[in-house]
Amino acid sequence: MSSVIEIKNVTKEFKVLNRREGLKGSIQDLFSRDYKIVRAVDNISMQVQQGEIVGYLGPNGAGKSTTIKMMTGVLEPTSGEILVSGNVPYENRTRNAQQIGVVFGQRSQLWWALPLIESYRLLKEIYCIPDADYTHMLELYRSLVDLEPLLHKPVRQMSLGQRTLSDILAAFLHNPKIVFLDEPTIGLDVSMKAKIRTLIQALNQEKHTTVILTTHDMGDVDALCRRVVIIDKGKMLYDNDMEHLKGFFGSYRTLKLRTDGDHAAQAAAMQKMLPELKVSADTEWISVLVDESRAHVIDVLAQLQKQYTIRDMQLQEISTEEIIKKIYEEGVQ
Amino acid sequence: MNLKRYVTLTRAGIMESLQFRLSAFIMVLGNLLYLIVTFFLWKSIYAAAGTETVSGMTFNDTLIYLVLATALFGFMDMYIVWEIGRSIQSGQIVLELLRPMQYRKYLFWAYSGSFVTQFFFTFLPTFLIVAAVTHGAIRFGVNLLFFVISVVLAVSINYSIDFLVGTICLYTESIWGINIMKQVIVLLLSGATIPLAFFPEPLHSVALCLPFQSIYNAPLTLLLDGEPQMQNVLQILGTQAVWVVVMGLASMAFWKVSIRKITVNGG
Amino acid sequence: MKHTLGFYLRLYGMILAQDLKSKMSYRADFIISTVGMIATNVAGFVSFWILFRNFPSIGGWGYYEILFLYGFSLVSLTPVQCLFDNNWSLRQYVYSGDFIKYCFRPVNLFFYYQSEVFDIKGLGQLAFGIAMIVYAWGKLGLAVTVLAVVKLLVFLLTASLVMIALQNAAAATCFWIQNSFYVLDFVTRFKDYARYPVTIFSPVFRFVFTFLMPIAFIAYYPSLVILRPDEVPLLSWLSPVIGVVFFFLSYRFWMYGAMKYSGTGS
């Protein structure tokens, strides 16, 4: 099977202006400027097969958006090669655009003042979608989500969730080979997140569309991605399947507690009580990192409750940042 | 009143506008270009008239008057209407109202920094150039002092008008339309496009009764008058002072009424 | 994939129709803006009228000839107002990073960006301009022939490209510098200078306004073809070519900036 995206040793550098501080600095900036080179993406290589959903993870400023911009043909790599379904994206932006769909976070690409259906009609023209395909696609959408109430609503009157949904549907409308989704669930509530995930899954299955998904939400990754690529500071840290990552980390969750009295002292006491777990404290919370392959959160909570008065608690999935921290500390593969 | 915080705002404004070295350069260039066009345009207009003086204005008077009116406009027009309009539309206005400072004052002092840079970067060079070009048509005497006083009053009147018009944005989304209408009326009736002296009656008398002439016509008349008569000077400055008070009160009152309406009805 | 001109025209038509429909939903804004636009034109005309009450002519040009020039400039400045108004928002899109959203479509980026806004207010200016041209034409006693009208239309159309080109180039500076508003504002002020005969300037500035900041091609040179048909200078006949060339160059500059920029925002 041939790959639909091929990235070979890609690097991207930017020139950034160093601004000086203070009134004196502003005056100095008038006369001379001082630049530095920032390497946003550093020698990345990967291949993606048709129909895959790849989770592309990393903290803010890791170089995710830059990589996506290079794949969509908006940015030219400083060095290295990119092929997206046979095209060099930067050299042939419009031809590449016909093959891809993009949803960029909270920036709607739909016409703000128009009812959704009119935006879709314009997209039909722009992408030269044949009538039959267009009708078929709308039928498919109707079977997946409750589309009718949205179609006649101007985009500017939609809630964030409705807008994201509409944008995702718009990105799949011309049946592209690849869809890039940048933070599609950011700022949405739990039920909307679930809806969006189901939709992406369904469209991927139905149309065999490749999906590149960047997110901070491990829930998205868990629900959608078999394969995960992690980058940080422009460098690739991990590229393998999700199961492998889970196997390595176990399934961690963080139990956060608020108790009466001094957190630091109590955390130290708890650590003694639970030697196999990691306990830390700050002014707000006491955090207990629970490896669910060894202990159940419920049992830990029950055990602690016998000794301490727990005022408040939260349960947190492990975040991308924590995974990256762990990869740095312990390494993978 | 704590002077230090006002100075801090002014200083921040200066720093902000200095970051844009190009904009200052372009503004000077723009004024220079305007000066050139005005110079040649009026030179050929006066050539066709065949007389030295038309409606009491010589060629030099007209040139100084128009070029400095534009320079004053560039330095006074701080896009206050846009600022207020955007702040209202984005809902930012609610936060502005929470500041421990009256919004009207805050905005003025926040913009005062750019007054200072604009004055040095655009008005002063233009003034010096036009003084040199017209060699000696501007008298460097007590009239300069009157001019400066008059400009200070004009800044206040102009700010009040801007604030008043900006307040209208609480009622409509049409910032562009509101702003362009204000600009057109102010520029025409203040004498910034054609000196008021050329206006035919009764347009001339009407314009003199409106506050707009106090913004450009008043300071420029004082500047061009080489041998000022005390009575005349006092009359012009007095009229301006009256407009400072009237427009100041009007803009404050209108703002108060409008804000109450917003807080009652919800934004 | 190469799109034909027909494809772009149809697409523009569709977007325009939708845009007008949605504009109607902001009726108050539409009315106030239109009144503002009419006020601008009335004020411009009043200044012009006051000027000519005090002075008989400008640089050997009479009232009706200057009125013709004025009308010509208003009409040739209409397309830039109506069709390319989105240039004014470019700075904000670039600054906020939202510009990126225009880059993902399989159509020409410049076209796609400009097609988003049609500024209907400009039509008021068009009406003023046409009225002035017709009135001055009659008063000057110029012959009304098919050839003259065709000439007028061709020269108006190509003259309009000059200001479009200047504005495109000015707007595109925002891809490099932050405060491009001043550049755009600077260039927009040229509009007001276009309505005077370039002969009033000294030779140096005649050169500047002809070749460096080509505002003489917005009204002066092209309207000579109608106003003074017996003594048309070569530059007048060249003005259509100059319009097209300038437009093309500004388009390339705009696109170059857009492609160069698109990455740097978040």
Image (tube, coloured by chain):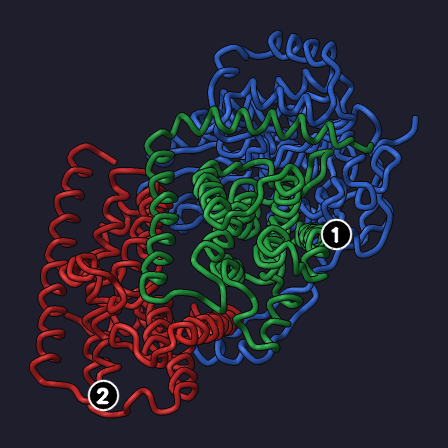
Chain colours: A blue, B red, C green
At x 31%, y 48%, the residue is B181
Judging from the image, mark 2 belongs to the subunit labelled B
Q: Residue at x 18, y 32 (%)?
A: B265
The quarter of the picture where residue C56 lies is: bottom left
Q: Is residue A176 left or right of residue C184?
A: right
Name the amino acid type tagged 1: Lys
Front in this rendered view, residue A191 or A219:
A191
Secondary structure of the residue carrying tag 1 is strand
Disc number placed over residue C253 in the picture, else none = none
Establish if B211 lies above or below B241. above
Which residue is label 1 attached to? A235
Numbered disc 2: secondary structure: loop
Instruction: Name the disc covering residue B226, or none.
Output: 2
Residue B266, position as x, y percentages in the image: 22, 34
Q: Nearer the viewer, residue A183 or A269?
A: A183
Residue found 75% across the figure and 15% down from its top: A130
In-front residue for pair A321/A92: A92
